[in-house]
Amino acid sequence: PVDFSGTWGLVSSENFENYMKSLDIDFMTRKVAKMLTPQKVIEQQGDKFSIRTLSTFRNYLVEFKVGEEYEEDTKGLDNRKLLSLVTWDNERLVCVQKGEKKNRGWTHWIQGDELHLELTCEDQLCKQVYQKV
Ligand code: RET
């Protein structure tokens, strides 16, 4: 079974700016956010996860259990309320974020020693890769 636990640092990011635009994130936040190299601190116990996105500018925390819908408050990002559900797709963690934006969600998987993250919103796809720090 796959274990996502650890501290991961961003090594590459594609299309993050357009992803943020699709979320209506304001100009100033976008300009700062795209310069960051955030870390993901993931704690996994079976199907229970806490995923911290840490940066010098702002932090973001999600906690969930796979298969259980939860209310997500995207405070500090686009400040919306979502109904989110994470499920396993083989060894990938797939989150569907229901709310005002169509096609919103993310997928996490491990490939070699890398943690991959794809974020979608509307017609935008952002791809990020992290490595253990
Ligand atoms: C930062 C800095 C402030 C502005 C924005 C951010 C984006 C955070 C994102 C977090 C995604 C978290 C996920 C967690 C679960 O796995 C870096 C906090 C916009 C997009 C997918």
Image (cartoon, rainbow, N blue to C red):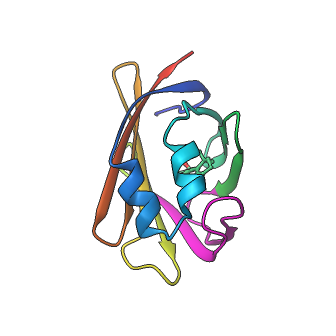
**3 or 117, which is in the foreground?**
117
Question: Can residue 11 be seen from the camera position used here?
Answer: yes
Where in the figure is residue 125, as x and y percent of width and height? 31, 56
**91 or 131, which is in the foreground?**
131
> Going by the image, does 79 lie left or right of 87?
right
**45 or 97, which is in the foreground?**
97
Farthest left residue? 123
> What residue appears at the point 40 percent right and 18 percent down from the top-left corner?
113
> What residue appears at the point 54 percent right and 64 percent down from the top-left corner?
25
Residue 123 counted in the magenta span: no
> Going by the image, does 77 lie left or right of 118?
right
Where in the figure is residue 97, as x and y percent of width and height? 50, 71
- The stretch in magenta equals 65-88
Q: Is residue 104 above or below residue 41?
A: below
> Going by the image, does 92 lie left or right of 46?
left
Residue 78 counted in the magenta span: yes
> What residue appears at the point 64 percent right and 57 percent down from the top-left corner?
65
**105 or 21, which is in the foreground?**
21
Question: Can residue 119 be seen from the camera position used here?
Answer: no
- Quarter of the image for residue 69 reads bottom right
> What residue appears at the point 31 percent right and 62 percent down from the top-left corner?
124
Q: Is residue 32 above or below residue 75?
A: above
